[in-house]
Amino acid sequence: NLDLKSGETVALVGHYGAGKTTLINLILKLYEPTSGNISLSNKKYSTTSHAWIRSHMALVFQDTELFSSNIRDNVSYGLQNVSDKQIIDALKQANAYEFVQKFKNGLDEQIGERGVKLSGGQKQRIQIARAILQNKPILILDEATSSLDSRSESLVQDALEKLFKGKLTIIIAHRFSTIQNADRIIVLDNGTIVGDDTPQKLAKKKGL
């Protein structure tokens, strides 16, 4: 059993195959549970649509979901009637506007298949700008900084901290730094929750 509250940052940790991704897929209603119930704002998943559930969530994943279009389309993806000013504001908050400005075509710059023209850190910051613009109450993050150099990581980390404010943030955590900054850590082992507490309290307990 697990109860996640608005405004808290929760890190999911565990060995490879412990069930972290499965739990995220259940929260996104990509999987249907074989038993038990999942609820969002007291509405059972079994009686609500995929669209309603996902309308509450923004994702930033390690495998960057970018499209072979321009920067404007990638940042505003899934939204209608978004102004260039709103896109630029989101890019600034994501520490991305500085490099976007340098492109000859600015927001109209074509980034290639899966963002092939961008570096790893730039791709992540475009994704973060998209999540900032969407402004959903739940943010799901497959920790996005593990393959970046230190400068890119600090820019991405700074952008993420702005994005976390006031949201329920669920992070699949790979790095110790992320775990330290979480309000709670959920420790998974073989599909079971074996720990659930603050980083400080969990560090003092015996067990996984």
Image (spheres, rainbow, N blue to C red):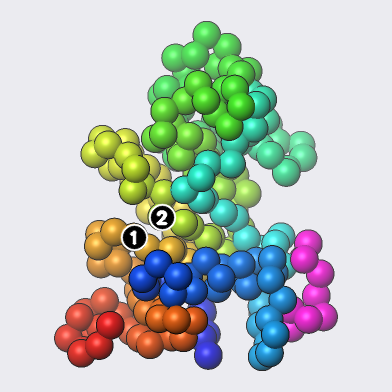
Give above or below for 131 relative to 155.
Answer: below
Where residue 148 sits, quadrant-wise, is top left
Q: Label 1 is placed on what type of residue? A: His
Instruction: Give the left or right position of residue 68, taking residue 106 as reference.
Output: right
Instruction: Give the left or right position of residue 104, taking residue 34 as reference.
Output: left
| Residue position marked by numbered label 1 in the rendering | 174
For mark 1, give the secondary structure: loop
| Residue position marked by numbered label 2 in the rendering | 143
Q: Which residue is at 25% across, 88% downward?
A: 207
Residue at the far top in the pictured view: 104
Count up the numbered dots: 2
Pointer 1 and pointer 2: residues touching (CB < 8 Å)?
Answer: yes
Q: Label 2 is placed on what type of residue? A: Glu
Determine if residue 193 is in view: yes
Image position, residue 43 (x, y; %): 74, 82
Span shown in magenta = 43-52
Disc assigned to residue 193: none
Within 10 angstroms of label 1, few (less than 14), some, or many (20 or more) residues? some
Q: Which residue is at 27% across, 36% downward?
A: 149
Inter-mark Cα distance, 1 to 2: 7 Å
- Label 1 vs 2, first from the N-terminus: 2
Nearest to the observer: residue 63 or residue 200? 63
Q: Which residue is at 20% across, 90% downward?
A: 206
Image position, residue 145 (x, y; %): 36, 47
Give above or below for 72 relative to 9.
Answer: above
